[in-house]
Image (spheres, rainbow, N blue to C red):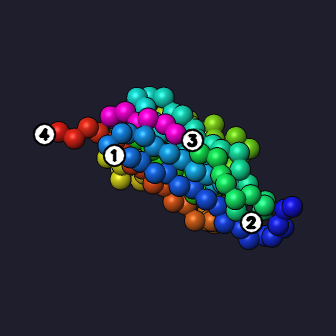
Amino acid sequence: MLFRSERYATLDICQVNLYTGICEFMKAGAAASYIIRNRHVQPVELPAMAPGLEKKTGYEKLRVRLRPGDYIVMITDGVCDALKNSQETKSMETVLEDLKKQSPQRMSEEILAKVSLRQDDENKDDMTVLVAGFWEKQG
């Protein structure tokens, strides 16, 4: 049974085990997340509706082993909306492929700047970008 409402929450969790490098995503109704490895961008999407829209207690999970130099990028749906097309995931992949590897802070600022260029003057939703980089501990 579907719960019909104009307001719903999404679930977007990324848990990283810093000892094993295993990253576990759990998503429900959330915008795609991305892993950047070298110049390759891998979208992370799981087929689940937002919590409250379906009667389901468990959610699918995706596990990925991170490597030194990998980045995880998580975005809100407002970032997707600003891309203004039905191919948001592909458009976001293009934005991410063109990024220079730098600090996660600078990367998130660059993503927001590039996406902001594609939107109207009016922000319809919040736009949040989280970038996390992973490296081997030195010393």
Checking the image for residue 52, the label placed there is 2
Q: Which residue was labeled with disc 1?
A: 18
Query: Quick check: marks 3 and 2 in contact, CB under 8 Å?
Result: no
Q: Amino acid at mark 1?
A: Leu
Query: Quick check: marks 1 and 3 in contact, CB under 8 Å?
Result: no
Residue 18 vs residue 125: left or right?
A: left
* Residue positioned most to the left: 139
Of the two numbered discs 2 and 4 on the same chain, state the one appearing first in sequence. 2
Q: Which residue was labeled with disc 4?
A: 139
Q: Regarding mark 2 in the picture, which secondary structure is present there?
A: loop
Residue placed most toward the observer, 51 or 43: 51
Start-end of magenta stretch = 63-69
Give the CA distance from mark 1 to mark 3. 17 Å
Q: Which residue was labeled with disc 3?
A: 62
**Residue 3 pos. (x, y %):** 82, 66
Query: Quick check: marks 4 and 1 in contact, CB under 8 Å?
Result: no
Residue at x 52% of width, y 39% of height: 63
